[in-house]
Amino acid sequence: MYDKLTPGDIKKMEEEIEYRRLVVRPQVLADVKEARAHGDLSENFEYYAAKKAKNQNDSRIRYLERMIRTATIISDESAEDEIGLNNTVTVEFVDDGTMETYRIVTTVRGNSLEGLITNESPLGKALLGKKVGEIAHVQVNEAVSYDVRIVSFDKTVDEGNDKIRSY
């Protein structure tokens, strides 16, 4: 499910790996060394907490490396007048006229609470390839569906808050 990544996703993962190796790892190793110097390890909570932080950092590095190694690279390119990955889209729900703005991202960056919907979600799938003014039919499941009208979209990519989710 999380194997389709854009070149931008791969770049962000590589940056996080480098940060964790060059900044976080030396700090957590220093914390382990300092906690070990405090004496009896059997009752030393600081030592166990430092070891846990070290192991979590190492685990995150391995996770990101495995995702990069097994990823299928997909393009985030689309026609100038069509909605594609990393586009910010404003839609109007046909049923009630409410408007919402979303950004279509890959599954590793999706966060619906922040308006980041994935290209694998029903709404994301329905919007990809559409143009301004078109109506997209969103099929949630066999019993539930709705229509949205594409009001506008922006191809400008602002990756300021995009983070690769942890699992």
Image (tube, rainbow, N blue to C red):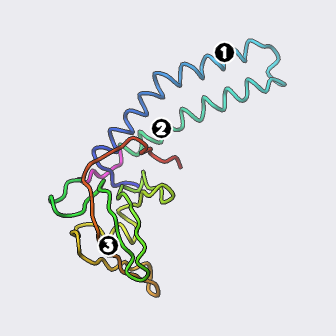
Quadrant of the image occupied by residue 99: bottom left
> In the picture shown, does residue 163 fall above or below 91?
above
Q: Is residue 72 magenta?
A: yes
Residue nearest the observer in this picture, 7 or 123: 123
10 Å crowding of disc 1: few (<14), some (14-19), many (20+):
some
Q: Residue at x 53, y 24 (%)?
A: 25
Q: Is residue 133 magenta?
A: no
Which numbered disc, 1 or 2, marks the residue that appears first in the sequence?
1
| CA distance for labels 3 and 1 | 53 Å
- Residue 1 placement (x, y as % from top left): 41, 60
Which of the numbered marks, if any, corresponds to residue 149?
none
| CA distance for labels 3 and 2 | 34 Å
| CA distance for labels 1 and 2 | 22 Å
Relative to 28, is 158 on the left or the right? left
Relative to 157, is 63 on the left or the right? right
**Start-end of magenta stretch:** 69-74
Q: Amino acid at mark 1?
A: Lys
Quadrant of the image occupied by residue 55: top right
Residue at numbered disc 1: 33
Residue at numbered disc 3: 126
Which numbered disc, 3 or 1, marks the residue that appears first in the sequence?
1
10 Å crowding of disc 3: few (<14), some (14-19), many (20+):
some
> In the picture shown, does residue 148 fall above or below 52?
below
Q: Residue at x 24, y 53 (%)?
A: 155
Which of the numbered marks, if any, corresponds to residue 62?
2
Select label 3 or label 2 by which is in front: 3
Select label 3 or label 1 by which is in front: 3
